[in-house]
Amino acid sequence: MTEKTPVLEADQRLSLPRGVRLRRDEVRGRTVLLSPERTMALEETAIAIVSRIDGKRTLAEIIDGLAADYKAPRDVIAGDVEAFLQQLLQRRMLEVDR
Amino acid sequence: MEATDSVADTNPPMAMLAELTHRCPLACPYCSNPLELKQQASELPTGDWVRVLGEAAALGVLHVHFSGGEPASRRDLVELTKAANNVDLYTNLITSGVGLTERRMNELAQAGLEHVQLSIQGTDAAEADHIAGYKGGHSRKMDVARWVRSHDLPLTINAVCHRQNIDHLQRTIDLSVELGAHRLEVATVQFHGWAAKNRAALMPTKLQDAEARRIVDAAREQLKGILVIDYVPADYHATYPKACMGGWGRIGLNVDPTGRVLPCHAAESIEGMEFDNVRDKSLADIWYQSKAFNVFRGFDWMEEPCRSCDRKAIDFGGCRCQAMAMTGNAGATDPVCSKSPLHAKLLDTVIELDAVSSPPPLVYRGR
Ligand code: SF4
Ligand code: SF4
């Protein structure tokens, strides 16, 4: 098999693939990330992460931005962000630009 | 969660299965569609579907699954996809691929289609076309997969597995990767509808099931981040039943081709059930108030052993249609459950089927 399991690296630009999108769920008063057969209800921090995934920012820039906005230590933020994005990556809900 | 079936505690539905038509050019012997197919003339017209999509979105539905039959048999499929997109529903097309053209796929992608689930009946033309009873079907499916991926749309391959093809599981996995699929759903045939007629020919043996699990586990590990594999084993081999539909009237609803609203695809097999129609009532009214949705909602309807079982909020007593089919009582514990008094009898049947060395020939739907 030629396909390789994708990995996350700091200088990669991240984007949401087609078929994965963030929307407001007014009926339940929350924000969800929709993908095939799946609905993820997102907490505030997860919304902040996903909103920064725009095909332009790199992983490092996303972490920098969040660390600044939340006035939190960068390594703490980095751990959370990577753990969350790893989940998305495994489910093919995230694209990394190579 | 509290035991209840009152309206106040019912959550809004997450998903709607829109069965646009029962028309289908294929003739799968494991079809779960009702044996009496609805005629085209009685199908819900475009305008009504557009209204229903709007009502669904307002009610809280997030995902709409266009299915059938073959949904591409409906001329207004593109229009309906657009309508769903307009009210921000996540649109999924569940198709056999037959009846789609490259041009139509382009139009669907433009209309905002977000995901395609493509069923395959085998891994090569000879096997697949034998099962589907349709020549040339398989090669068209391979085309459809390419068109879907050319638009960067996520693709799920649906493979129904049964006694005669479960040994080809590894090839099914390889083919899914080759086609660029994101997800492979391997579901063991459910013995409802037409499939019940072919139970002896289709039911996988316990040995086959164990081998399938081994293959799936190994592939999951190897294909992390490439292919998500969902494997739904034959529930006859399980200790506890599946949470059918995630619980009756809890997560989703089905609108059939004539506009009737069902809690599940096979609910029709339950005698005495009456279903409201979107031509007469709003979807919200049907979801919250109708008898069909409330009858098995919550826990109050349960009998023993479910009533006092600590798994009742996990599996909701299993499948009502299966309980109906095997015990004659839709309110009974699903006999797949090892706690059911009828479980032993069911196992005997399974063992008997396993022992059938050469399965009987298939009976084709609509032939
Ligand atoms: S009630 Fe039965 S037929 Fe209906 S969805 Fe559940 S398992 Fe399937
Ligand atoms: S007794 Fe009923 S609730 Fe308990 S595991 Fe069996 S089916 Fe589920």
Image (tube, coloured by chain):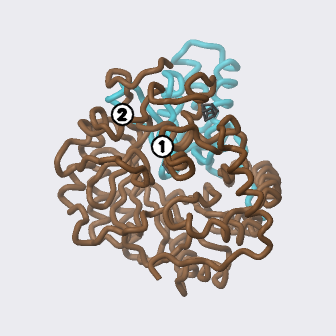
Helix or strand or loop: what does disc 1 sit on?
A: loop
Residue at (65, 80) in percent of width and height? B361
Is residue B130 in sight in this rendering? yes
Going 61% across and 61% down the picture, which residue do you hit?
Answer: B189
Estimate the spatial distance between the alpha carbons at disc 1 and disc 2, rounded to whole Å.
14 Å
Q: How many marks?
A: 2
For disc 1, the marked residue is B330
- Reading the image, the residue beneath label 2 is B294
| B206 or A78: nearer the viewer | B206
Image coordinates for residue A34, horizontal then vertical, percent: 47, 41
Q: Classify A42 as above or below A91.
A: above
Which chain: cyan? Answer: A
Query: Label 1 marks which chain's residue?
Result: B
What is the three-letter code of the residue carrying label 2? Asn
Q: In the image, is residue B90 above or below residue B364?
A: above
Give the quarter of the image for residue B301: top left
Name the residue at 55% across, 65% down.
B195
Comes first in the chain, label 1 or label 2:
2
Res A30 → quadrant: top left
Mark 1: amino acid:
Ala
- Where residue B161 appears, as percent x and y from the top left, is 66, 64
Q: Position of residue B97 (x, y in %)?
A: 48, 72
